Image: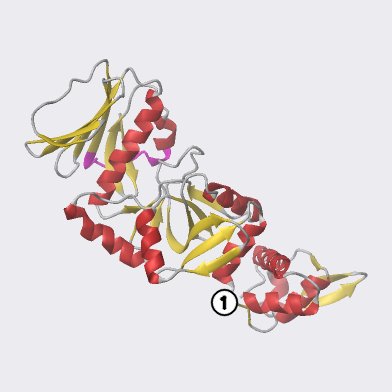
Amino acid sequence: MSNYQIAGINLRINQIEQSFLTNSLKPYESTHQPAYVIDVRQADEILPLSEGLVKESTYRRIFQNDGNTTVQVYHKEGHIRYQISYDKDCINQSILISSKETKIDEAEYILVSMSFLELSLRLGYINLHASVVVKNNEAYLFCAPSGTGKSTHSNYYLEAFRDAFILNDDKPLIKDGMVYGTPFSGKNRYNKNEVYHIRSIYFIKQGPLEVRTLTIDEKLKQLIMNSFRPDKKELLDAYFKNIEYLLTLPIHEAILTNSIESVYLTYYHIIKEKLMQLKPGYVLREVGSKYIVIPVEEASLDFNGIMTLNKTGKLLFECLKDEQTVEDLVNALTASYEVTEELARKDVIGFIEHLKKHQLLK
């Protein structure tokens, strides 16, 4: 039994003994007084309810009594697999898992995440089925159905950029344009207990490299299709308040290949109009077949390393003496060399990252 703070929500989760949830939850441990409780237990037998039945399907029955709701889910062989009960405001939620379940730890992980997401909806959060990458203290969300490649694309970001990391790989929470890490993060378990501003959202597909900005109608459709939606009327206002805010953000459809080159397309699409310029006080000197960046005057106090450039780097360095967009730099490369736009994007982004590392940009 421990107290946790997840996305600013203070709660207690009473887990099954030796739960593998423990490691996932550890970074979220808190000394704050819990406002909500999720209690998980095993039972040799879960008895079927009879009073207060309000909805029934093949394997699911929902009951309501005295303001409390109970959901019982049946196995095809007839016994109850698990039961979830909660009060009106989800202040207290209880989960019973049948001992007949073959993978109790996985069932606990799924059911606790479902209970937590239900609670978060009531508190004005929204959950997108997304893998979230953070770079330059900004979050990029890659959304898609399972198996489409969102986690693969996120991992290519880690390969391409040393400063990138995964905030959450499956179930981040979003509120007021900020995205929060949660311990519920898919099979890879990648997550951090941190929060970042959302820079862009991509809905990804597999195919030849292409990015396009979605229309408002397309954005709305994709956001609703890829989010955990409330089934209660009283929760719709908060849900659509978040949706309306997300509609103001850059949202794109990205058709991507299973390769690191796809990273340079999605990242470039966001930064291509960003203006950049070198700090004053740096000059180039040709030595043999290379060009050396030399700091002069005040710049020499801040830079004591050695940076060498090839001809491509020299061209980009000279361009950046004046203010340029990233797109300008790509166009300069393709105009000066027989190089594809795809390769030019990769070279320009790599060069910019190199300059950032040495703090040579304004």
* Magenta stretch in the rendered image: 26-36
Image height of 210 relative to 60, above or below: below
Q: Residue at x 43, y 62 (%)?
A: 197
Residue 332's spot in the image, x, y percent? Answer: 73, 79
Along the line of sight, the residue nearer the viewer: 91 or 259: 259
In the image, what residue type sits under mark 1?
Answer: Glu
Image height of 342 relative to 100, above or below: below
Extreme-left residue of the structure: 66
Q: Residue at x 73, y 72 (%)?
A: 300
Pointer 1 residue:
273
Label 1 environment density (alpha carbons within 10 Å; few <14, some 14–19, many ≥20): few
Extreme-right residue of the structure: 288
Residue 148's spot in the image, x, y percent? Answer: 52, 48
Along the line of sight, the residue nearer the viewer: 215 or 45: 215
Image height of 345 relative to 154, above or below: below
Image height of 194 relative to 66, above or below: below
Left or right of 308 in this view: 181 = left
Report the number of numbered marks.
Answer: 1
